[in-house]
Amino acid sequence: MNRIRVMHVIIGLGTGGTEMALRRVVTGVDPNLFEHVICSTTTFVVDPLPEVRITCLGRPFGKPGTLVPSLVRLFRKERPMLVHSRNWGTIEAILAARLAGVPAVVHSEHGREFGGMNGEPLRRRLFRRFCYPLASCVFTVSDELRAYQARQSGMSESRFRVIPNGVDLTQFRPDPEERSAQRQQMGAGPKTFVVGSVNRFDRVKDQVTLLRAADAVAGRGVDLRLVVVGDGPLRSQLEQTAKDLPNLAGRAVFPGMVQKVRSWLNSFDAFVLPSLSEGMSNTLLEAMAVGLPPVATRVGGNVEVIEEGRCGLFFAPRDEAQLAAHLSELARNEELRHSLGSRARQRIESQFSLTRMMNDYKNLYCELLRPHARVQAALNQL
């Protein structure tokens, strides 16, 4: 059986949440039925996937101009049956796919940029209003993001679907051996309260609030170690801030980008997500799957993942005092940590598994492609 070609368009294949979700899709959504191909509009490709073909258009980040002609040529050459573009940076692929005669077009929104937290420029809102109706389907990863995109485009929320992210429950799970080995490696004792976070170092992630809250908790006499996994343009600034804070100096670890995120997560006693805005955080899902009690800002998809008081705690964005209070409570109450973490794992198992996410993507692709004669035979074999 000839596989159905799906072309995924993304700005670059880096290490962020959107890219992580894409990697899971192209390796997990029925490779026997679909041939997944990736188009990166830039040349930024970290750790390419050997089993998936990647085409790079080579456009520099931030360069003005349109990608439509290049994308039209690529789509006519590759002849995909479905094009799936992601986020504002590739929204032109919707128009290009229609001009190239692609049968089905999907666009998805996975989060917001820092500058768009309070609304987008008029030109973006108008272009969204023009492009979204051209797509066969537009979806977001959370209800909150669907409402935001509806407001920005001036369209009804009913025009958008929601497909939440999912996490591999066999890969991300509690592992006492990994926990012991990683804590020993970082010099954390059995009673050390290890607070951790995993995300890119960007203003929208607001790690500064986490640093200040951790400094306050350490100042109360807690044997605390802070681990901030990730990288980005603010890394050197954050490392300097940690050194300058009187109680945090010598207690903060910045391991950079790591291969085994699961090992670091298992070493934590609590996971903090201090973001000012979120679509649906993959690292939050992974931390909860490992059985960690999450402490997160009450923004975006966070409120759809965490059931407050049952499997996690919330604090207001930039509220370091409230975050410090939560961490202090978790530091002195081991039973609370375990109960929240256990229910966090159960929450992911029931609502946010990778299996559910893969089925949602497959069902969407099949639904949109079934009316087209060229793929009916393949789909009828499902």
Image (cartoon, grey):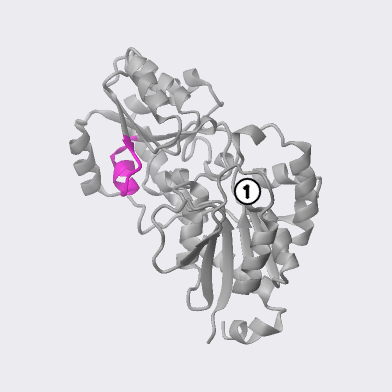
For the point 49% across and 48% down, which residue is it? 17
Q: Is residue 366 visible?
A: yes
Say left or right for 263 vs 180. Answer: right
Disc 1 packing (10 Å; few <14; some 14–19; many ≥20): some
Q: Is residue 319 above or below residue 273?
A: above
* Kind of residue indicated by mark 1: Gly
For the point 43% across and 25% down, which residue is it? 210
- Whether residue 56 appears in magenta in the rendering, the answer is no
Q: Position of residue 126 (x, y in %)?
A: 80, 45
For the point 70% across and 73% down, which residue is it? 103
Q: Closer to the camera, 4 or 220? A: 4
Say left or right for 223 vs 159. Answer: left
The segment highlighted magenta reads 255-269
**Quadrant (top left/top right/bottom left/bottom right) for the C terminus:** bottom right
Q: Is residue 134 above or below residue 321?
A: below
For the point 66% across and 72% down, which residue is it? 76
Q: Say which residue label 1 marks.
A: 89
Say left or right for 208 vs 370. Answer: left
Element under label 1? helix
Q: Closer to the camera, 151 or 231? A: 231
